[in-house]
Image (tube, coloured by chain):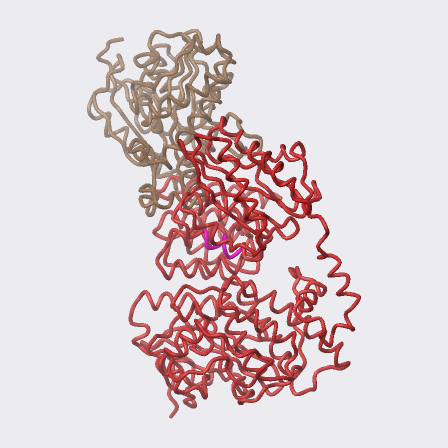
Amino acid sequence: MSSEQLFLGLDVGRTIRCALVRGDGQILCQQRVVAEVSDPQIFIDQLIETSNKMRSKGEVAAVGVGWAGLVDYETHRLEAMPNLVDASSFNLRSEMQSALGLPVIFDNDANAAAYAEWLCGAARGYKDVFYVTMGTGIGAGIIMGGKLQRGCRGFAGEFGHFKIDLDGLECACGSAGCLETIASGPNIVRRVREQLFSDPAFSISKLAADMESTLQCERVVEAAKEEDELALSVLRETGRVLGMALASVINLLNIEIVVLGGGVMAASELLLNSIREEARKRTMSPSFDCCRIVAASLELEAGMIGAAMLARDALQNGCA
Amino acid sequence: MSRMISHYRLEEELGQGGMGSVYKAFDETLDRWVVLKILAPELMAEEFSRKRFLREARLASALDHANICTIYETAEADNQFFIAMQFIEGRTLKRVINGRPMSADSLLAIALQVADALASAHAKGIVHRDVKSGNIMITPRGQAKVLDFGLAKLMTEKGRATEMEHPADELTRLGAPMGTPSYMSPEQARGERVDHRSDIYSFGVVLYEMATGRLPFRASSSVDMMHAVMHDTPRAVKEVNHQSPEELAAIIEQAMAKEPGERYQSMQQMLEDLQTFGVALRLGSGGVPDGATVPFIAPRRATSRKTLGGFFNRLFARKDDSPLYHAQTARRDEAQALSVQPSKKALAVLPFRNLSGEAQADFYGLSLADSLITALGNIRSLALTPSGAVERFQNQAINPASVRAELGVDLILMGNFLKAGERVRVTAQLVDARSGGILWSEKIDSETSDALAIHDRISREILAGLSQEHVAVDPMLLLRDENEEMRLDAVRTLEFSHDPRALSALVEAMRDTSLKVKAEAVAAVVKLGEEATGPVIQLLNDAIDEEDYLTARYAAKAMGLIGDRSISQVLVELLQCEDDFVACEAALALGRLKGTMAVAHLTRMLEDQNGNKRFAAAEALGQICDTGSREALQRRLSDDDDGVRAKARWALNRLRKADRA
């Protein structure tokens, strides 16, 4: 296969990111659109339109889609999308293939991003990798022995639904006490707002004034960088919870490297410090000592690159 | 043709004044007579005053009590603000008194109704500020109705001056100022901030007027009157009317104490004493009131803490030859037996609490207590608890009742110390273990260079303090220390104090400039429970008026955490508060109380531009779990705010679970 062969990589969450990617993982061009999450048909049309626009910029061999939800690896059907529009009644792969006239593969978005970080990012050269993406939801990709591990049907890696609290909040997945109910972007903002109401002292913080209209996780991260006490306390706590959950993974899988990515990791140093500290306290020393915990290097491009590379591999293996 | 305002037909002008005009009017929608007060435009011109007035009037309209004139509506029509209220047939109490003393029976029948009305309003945080005989209507059946709740704040200084010249008909003459000079409390006359204890004073003046037929002070101008209120002592009730019962005079005297801390601390306490007086009066006379008015005994509230014995004990301590003495001998003996001074008082000196945060300074606390035990051991009238028995209290928050139960002591000497560099500050308090009241308090500053000298000096000063007459210390003084740690500790001490003034002091502490003290005061006030609701709402209203929104937010937080269901309507009103955080706290409180009556208001709040309000509304609706809010919550799933989306999803999950259940 020539490195000049091109692939489309889509990272689909509340934002649709789409890139034209070379066979060596280099992005040639990319675009993003806000997903229409209230209507599945509009959403699907958006995907097709975005892909069509991008493929017009070069000759595309295959399309990879990283999807924020459970994807059946055998059938490429979407099984559950806790944070997205419910498109489970659509055969999305077949609709896209016929609309684009190209082979299309679907995989979980965290698997795609993990694959990219392993191929050309922070986990390059490692064999046992645990990649975590933290945004609207929390997902993970597991690479063991240099191979992406999906489980028997592709549903492995749902780190966001790791149970961390017996009496925790109800989660979008239908269960309760999931990691995501504390550490996902929306839940970080929820906790910031709850802190604001639990202690009126916070109502004089600058962040409280910012909250009067709308608040997104990015602003919380910015405020933490500006030393805002409310934002700092919530992010530190988030780091501790993530560190506690990661300790279980490290103890279970004896991972070589944990790579942390996604929008929430914009606060990388602040989060990393408390994640490492908590993970160290809660992991058996030999396991912790041989494990690195680092920030992802491909940032928000990982999902698109990984999806494109998974499409490339599938085409190469005759699976697309 | 009669003039119309909104759906009210104006029939007869009842009066005019600085506040506007008063009409008898007919409500054509509901077919009933009302009194319509049309407010002077200049009073409503300024937005802040208008908002303040409307908030107060809306809160007052939430009052539902047989002895309070109901406010039906506060509204605006044709650029005129007006208040529609219940039309009451009858005469003002001023006219009923008409310059002559009332019989004790008639007085009591009216006093109990008015006291119950005021207690009920105070429990909802509403202070009248202009209690006077002209603001109390007596119907032909003898029912008392208190008028004009919530209106006093609108009145102006300008109106006050006219009061003296026209005392005849307060019902129809609008424009009375914030309090009428003859009935004003001293703090009101000084222009200070007032709380419910100001109403207690004014009600004392009304009782004085009923008992004697005259006002306690006479003056030719409002300035002279206010001076008299602040500085003069009125002639004793018994001196003006020899027929007046001693017990009634004692109640009036306590209500009219110059210092708020020396009055009844709640209208409920005063009501209970009036009820007890009523029982005594019937026992003494062998009959019921003379029928001049409908006899009415306000119901006792469940929160009553005083006993008949306690009341008589206080009264008879003043005069043992009361005519009621023999009828109540057995009860009095029992009460006195409880308060009999034993020959020896049991005293526990607890280890002083270390506020320094340095563990190595802990020894001061123990050694100070130890040396005091040794020094005090020489006083024969004291039985000291050995130091071994008190060690476990080191650096603990002290609840006097628990210490009393555990050690069986009458008095507790406790305190704390703060060590900073070479200086040490010790605060000691002598607490009555039974009541929790602080009997004596002292602050001692010293150098740390000579530990023994410090111990000696502190022991000497504390001994000197102990040997003085025990006069109750005003808890407010403890909260005025310039050191934040000391004020914090004072709040923690007051939390467990049963001093009747502790509640007012703790509520006041919520105004402290330190956020830590504010937060600690909130925690302490919340623990006091529903008893604190009224004073906290008062604070909230005053803080909003003063634009001290931070204090208002703490007050709103406390109010929500107390969780008093009886104020749900007040909370609904506060959803419209000009301060968004107060509105949010009201929403959260309604959620905790499962206030289904607020679902429509909260659903509207979900569409507010303010993200905090949308978030609070989603939280409240999730708690209430009413299916009527489902669609509005679903729309929030695409909110631009991450937190609102998460909260709406959580609320919808709760609704789904409720559906399944």
Please tell me which residue lies in front, B619 or B358. Answer: B358
Q: Which chain does red denote in the image?
A: B
| Rendered image quadrant of residue A91 | top left
In this picture, is B342 found above or below B205? above
Q: Which residue is drawn at 61% across and 50% down?
A: B436
Task: List the single residue furthest toward the bottom.
Answer: B1
In this picture, is A132 found above or below B163? above
Q: Magenta residues: mostly which secondary structure?
A: helix
Q: Which residue is drawn at 62% across and 37% down?
A: B373
- Lateral position of residue B383 relative to residue A215, left or right: right
Q: Number of labelled discs?
A: 0
Residue A61 in magenta stretch = no
Q: Is residue B453 visible?
A: yes
- Lateral position of residue A177 relative to residue A193, left or right: right
From the image, state the color of chain A.
brown
Residue B305 x, y percent position in the rendering: 66, 59
Residue B304 x, y percent position in the rendering: 66, 61
Please tell me which residue lies in front, B541 or B314. Answer: B314
Q: Residue at x 51, y 71 (%)?
A: B201
Residue B615 x, y percent position in the rendering: 42, 46
In this picture, is B642 found above or below A294? below
| Rendered image quadrant of residue B347 | top right
Please tell me which residue lies in front, B384 or A22. Answer: B384
Please tell me which residue lies in front, B420 or B197. Answer: B420
Residue B415 x, y percent position in the rendering: 54, 41
| Rendered image quadrant of residue B190 | bottom left
Which stretch did the figure color magenta? B503-509
Q: Can residue B625 be seen in this view?
A: no
Task: List the single residue furthest toward the right.
Answer: B330
- Lateral position of residue B280 relative to residue B127, left or right: right
